[in-house]
Image (cartoon, rainbow, N blue to C red):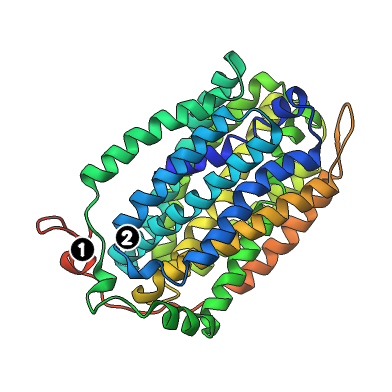
């Protein structure tokens, strides 16, 4: 499921040069296509956060994923830029709820001492989307039309929905003592200083990463002079590298401490971001090496951070908290995309001011090193299989 969410979101960025040409859209209009997904996810995440813990997480996942499939189909059939913006908003609305529910399920079922490794495994969906999904989607777009990758995603998502119905057990351990008092819990969470520090960490992660992501592909093509035919190689290489690095960073954070590993990865990411955003024309091999490091470190910092976030509140509030963090992430992602679209200027041969975005991303990343040390873990007993709502014979660890 995460693979389809991430591919649906990621495919818009490498399609940027093609959409700008074929639809004659500006940098600001393109950033609106990105922001529509995330802002919609933020609004819906805020609306459902007070109530999401009242339901079996499996049921929430099944329903929200159907909405995501409908939104993706609307992207494939959109006949105008306005229609595409609306379709992206539908995808974001349901995709955001699905994503928050997946992370809540992992937080409920996996013991705290192994949560970093678990999040590392979940994050490989990003790697698979980058290494296989996005390049294949680009191939389909270049071979046929830009809409084709979305038809491809709809086909995959229908299969995933069928597997979800057949294989995913009920997850309702958070309901063992009866339905949570959702609104009361939500209000209590809003008065929890630890939860607010975790939300600030999410904000810093987004602005430290997504300030440059929307224009990464156009920057590579227009400024670093990477041939557009080689753009897929960036995602293949980056995805393959993170398939190895994300689980390793997760295991390392469980062993050495999440804040410590996070700090090292963030410092490395800052250096790579500054190099990448200030680089000029360079050989293809140099561009691939630099973007490969970007995928490893800039994406890798989310692994220990997500494990910290999953431990910031008790299980009875985790669904609401994950929805709230998804809301904060999505709002800030939309704001970062819109802001980047206002800063960057497109000329016939280049994108101007990308380096300014790199400096901003590096500065906010530095702040996140301090913030992650302010978030405290809520210690809970490891859930048994039955507490998690998993059928007998299937262990929580499994």
Residue beneath label 2, please? Answer: 57
Disc 1 on helix, strand or loop? loop
Q: In the orientation shown, which residue stands out farthest toward the right?
A: 347
Residue 92 position (above or below residue 364): above
The percent position of residue 127, horizontal first and vertical second, equals 48, 40
Q: Residue at x 10, y 56 (%)?
A: 393
Residue 69: percent from the left, percent from the top?
A: 44, 39
Residue 113: x %, y % from top left: 33, 68
Quadrant including the N terminus: top left
Q: Nearer the viewer, residue 45 or 354?
A: 45
Answer whether labels 1 and 2 touch (C-beta < 8 Å): yes
Which one is closest to the eye, mark 1 or mark 2?
2
Horizontal side of 397 relative to 17 (left or right) equals left
In percent of the image, x 79 and y 55: which residue is there?
359
In the figure, 322 relative to 374: above or below? above
Query: Local crowd at mark 1 within 10 Å, few (<14), some, or many (≥20)?
Result: many
- The x and y percentages for residue 151 are 48, 26
**Is residue 325 at least partly visible in the picture?**
no
Q: Which residue is mark 1?
A: 389
Q: Residues within 10 Å of mark 2 (few under 14, many from 20)?
A: many
For this view, does 202 lie left or right of residue 251?
right
Q: Residue furthest left?
A: 393
Label 1 or label 2, whichever comes before in sequence order: 2
Mark 2 element type:
helix
Between the C-alphas of marks 1 and 2, the distance is: 10 Å
């Amino acid at each position: 499921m995460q693979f389809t969410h991430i591919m649906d979101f990621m495919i818009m960025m490498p399609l940027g040069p093609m959409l700008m040409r074929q639809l004659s859209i500006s940098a600001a209009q393109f950033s609106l296509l990105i922001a529509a997904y995330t802002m919609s996810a933020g609004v819906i995440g805020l609306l459902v956060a007070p109530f999401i813990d009242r339901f079996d997480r499996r049921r929430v996942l099944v329903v929200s994923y159907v909405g995501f499939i409908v939104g993706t189909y609307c992207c494939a059939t959109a006949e105008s830029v306005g229609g595409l913006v609306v379709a992206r908003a539908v995808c974001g609305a349901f995709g955001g709820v699905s994503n928050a529910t997946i992370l809540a399920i992992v937080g409920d079922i996996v013991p705290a001492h192994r949560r970093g490794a678990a999040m590392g495994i979940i994050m490989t969906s990003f790697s698979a989307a980058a290494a296989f999904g996005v390049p294949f989607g680009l191939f389909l777009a270049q071979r046929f039309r830009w809409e084709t990758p979305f038809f491809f995603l709809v086909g995959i998502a229908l299969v995933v929905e069928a597997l979800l119905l057949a294989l995913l057990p009920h997850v309702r351990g958070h309901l063992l003592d009866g339905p949570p008092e959702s609104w009361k819990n939500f209000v209590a969470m809003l008065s929890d200083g630890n939860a607010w520090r975790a939300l600030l960490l999410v904000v810093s992660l987004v602005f430290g990463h997504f300030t440059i992501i929307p224009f990464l592909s156009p920057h590579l093509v227009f400024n670093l002079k990477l041939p557009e035919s080689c753009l897929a190689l960036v995602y293949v290489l980056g995805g393959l590298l993170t398939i190895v690095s994300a689980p390793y960073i997760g295991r390392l954070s469980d062993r050495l401490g999440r804040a410590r590993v996070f700090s090292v990865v963030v410092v490395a990411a800052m250096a790579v971001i500054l190099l990448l955003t200030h680089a000029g024309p360079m050989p293809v091999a140099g561009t691939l090496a630099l973007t490969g490091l970007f995928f490893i470190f800039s994406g890798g910092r989310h692994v220990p951070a997500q494990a910290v976030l999953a431990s910031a509140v008790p299980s009875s509030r985790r669904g609401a908290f994950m929805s709230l963090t998804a809301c904060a992430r999505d709002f800030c992602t939309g704001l970062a995309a819109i802001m980047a679209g206002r800063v960057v200027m497109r000329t016939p041969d280049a994108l101007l001011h990308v380096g300014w975005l790199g400096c901003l991303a590096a500065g906010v990343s530095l702040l996140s090193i301090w913030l992650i040390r302010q978030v405290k873990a809520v210690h809970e007993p490891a859930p048994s299989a039955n507490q998690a709502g998993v059928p007998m014979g299937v262990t929580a660890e499994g």
